[in-house]
Image (cartoon, helix red, strand yellow):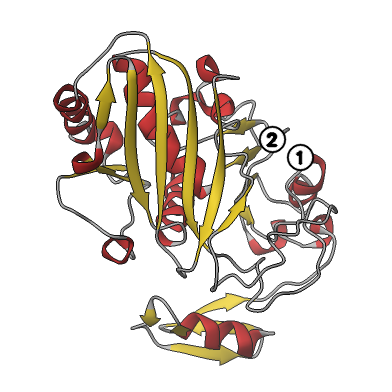
Amino acid sequence: DSETAAFLLKHDSVGGMLGNDVAVSSNGFSIDGRNIKKLESKNPADVPWGDEGVDVVIESTGVFTARDGAAGHLAGGAKRVIISAPSNDADVTICMGVNDGDYDAALHTVISNASCTTNCLAPLAKVLDDTYGIEKGFMTTVHAYTSDQSLQDLAATSRSGKPDLRRMRAAALSIIPSSTGAARAIGLVLPQLKGRLDGMALRVPTPTGSITDLTVELRKGASPEEINAAFAAAAANPAFRGVLQYSEEPLVSADIVGNASSCIFSAVDTSANGNLVKVLGWYDNEWGYSNRLVDLVRFIG
């Protein structure tokens, strides 16, 4: 309901209090006097976006990640739909700063913004592949717990419909190995890497702030210093502005909470053994991803 939405927008356990004036209105809520109208329907096609003059809809329910479901918003009058999750059959998957040049307004009406982890992984993979070439590799994301986990041990069914015994355990009490499609999804963003990367997730007891550990075999060897120089140069490229940040500080996860970048490259953690290379990139899995959604809306809108 509108009162709950307004309260949770104003009060955030991680981000703190919102500095803007938030008030409940007769048909939604307002921010600094600007009304946000509430529309509600179980079927996206029944939401009258066209009547409200809405051009771009962000499909963030987590329910309609397939194209057919998300495209219902188009029937309601929207011109474009952005799925805030991975999608196997969206018209295109875009990670800003990495492959936004793939967007074709004439062809793409349902767009996936991938996941927060893929948005962190993509700049790491692109810089390494463009500079040295990637043969194959593995990724591990050490990921903050999320709302689909439980505070206490709880017997529950995962989104896939299959039991995940590890994800049933209390999120704030254990390191929980889990699956992620982020590495495999990189082929939707960088097609030349399709089938070359795989990975897993370790869910850890932090509310936000995550890190991607990417280990790859390169086509040609490089020293840590050379790799860091390549990432420093990439981060200075306007194409990566706001997406890839270069850091030589000994950061911990608390340091990057509230950072809007998709990937904060950790130069102090780069290591190499001939063609075998490990790089790490931090990301605020909530705030960074939210900023990329805004960027994508502006880009296609």
Q: Quadrant of residue 271?
A: top left
In the rendered structure, which amino acid carries the disc numbered 2?
Ala
Residue that numbered label 1 is attached to: 67
Residue plotted at (65% across, 90% down): 26
Query: For the residue labelled by badge 2, is the local secondary structure a helix, a strand or a loop?
Result: loop
Whether 176 is drawn above or below 194: the answer is below
| 271 or 52: nearer the viewer | 271
Say which residue label 2 marks.
90
Q: Quadrant of residue 219?
A: top left
Image point (38%, 25%), residue name: 126
Name which residue type carries label 1. Answer: Arg
Q: Quadrant of residue 120?
A: top left
Q: On the rendered structure, is 223 left or right of 210?
A: left
Q: Is residue 269 left or right of residue 64?
A: left
Q: Residue at x 75, y 48 (%)?
A: 70
| Label 2: how many Cα within 10 Å (few below 14, some 14–19, many 20+) | many
Mark 1 burial class by Cα count in 10 Å: few <14, some 14-19, many 20+ = some
